[in-house]
Amino acid sequence: MKCPYCKAEISDDSQFCGNCGKKVTSKANSSPNFGKVIVACLVACVLIAGGWYVGSNFFFKKEVFPTFESFIALVDDCVRNDDVNEQIAKECGLEIIYSVKKDEEEYTSIDIVCGKDVEKGKYNENTGYDIVAKSDHAVYFNYSAETSSGAQLFFKDKDNSESFFKKAMDYGLLIYKDDYSESDTYFIPNKKLPNGSKRVDKFEYDGDDGARYALSKPEYEDGWYVIHIGIDF
């Protein structure tokens, strides 16, 4: 190659010109390090792919109870069939954790749990299986029936429980308070209200103006924020 200053011929790996003495950049030193370039490209691709995976799971993962109607459909299915349909549970963003039927002397006991980010724990003879949270946003639905029926929603996160109750209020609840109660009682109407929740002085259990299920505000119990669903009331 030639020296860029005096144009004298010098070897390709020279660092200094033998004629003028000035420092030059050799072709060998100026060649790009293709190995480093390839590694950098691979690292960038991994980071981009990882970011897309995390982002897609965050933005596209199915929301628990995307509509309040999906929650009502889940309760209706359990009450109607003493069982739970897997597709209905999936539409609520839940998976079936277990479904147990046990024949007693005078009745059949039912115990159903559907949840998200939970797993089945140890079995207790009196209370059934423990439910273990796998994340801070764990949630599960429990339906049980013996001589009477009832259901509960368990949220590990307080904000999630309050968000669900707000969704219920936006859907439309009947708000009732009798002369013997210190606080309001909330009921899911048989027919959706056109203008959201409303306070009533009285109501019937049957008909379009009647109540389907009772619903409590979230209450903190044993590490969970619990919403009780009254079925036989």
Image (tube, rainbow, N blue to C red):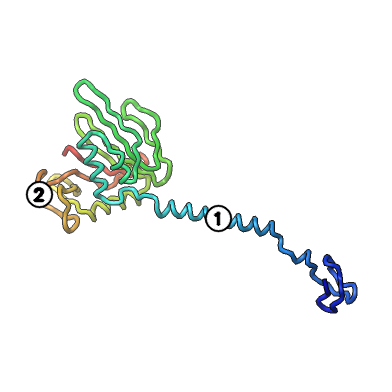
Q: Which residue is mark 2?
A: 202
Amino acid type indicated by mark 2: Lys
- How far from the left and from the top, in percent, is residue 195? 17, 59
Which picture quadrant has residue 1? bottom right
* Mark 2 to mark 1 CA distance (whole Å): 60 Å
Dots 2 and 1: beta carbons under 8 Å? Answer: no
State left or right for residue 53 relative to residue 128: right
Considering only vertical position in the picture, is 164 above or below 31?
A: above
Q: Is residue 98 above or below residue 213?
A: above
Kindly identify which residue carries mark 1.
47
Residue with the most extreme right position: 19
Q: Position of residue 80 (x, y in %)?
A: 20, 37
Q: Mark 2 falls on what kind of element? A: loop
The answer to whether residue 37 is above or below residue 180 is: below
Q: In the image shown, does 230 or 8 lie closer to the viewer?
A: 8
Sequence-first disc among 2 and 1: 1
Amino acid type, label 1: Leu
Instruction: Please tell me which residue lies in front, 12 or 215.
Output: 12
Rendered location of residue 210, percent (x, y) = 12, 47
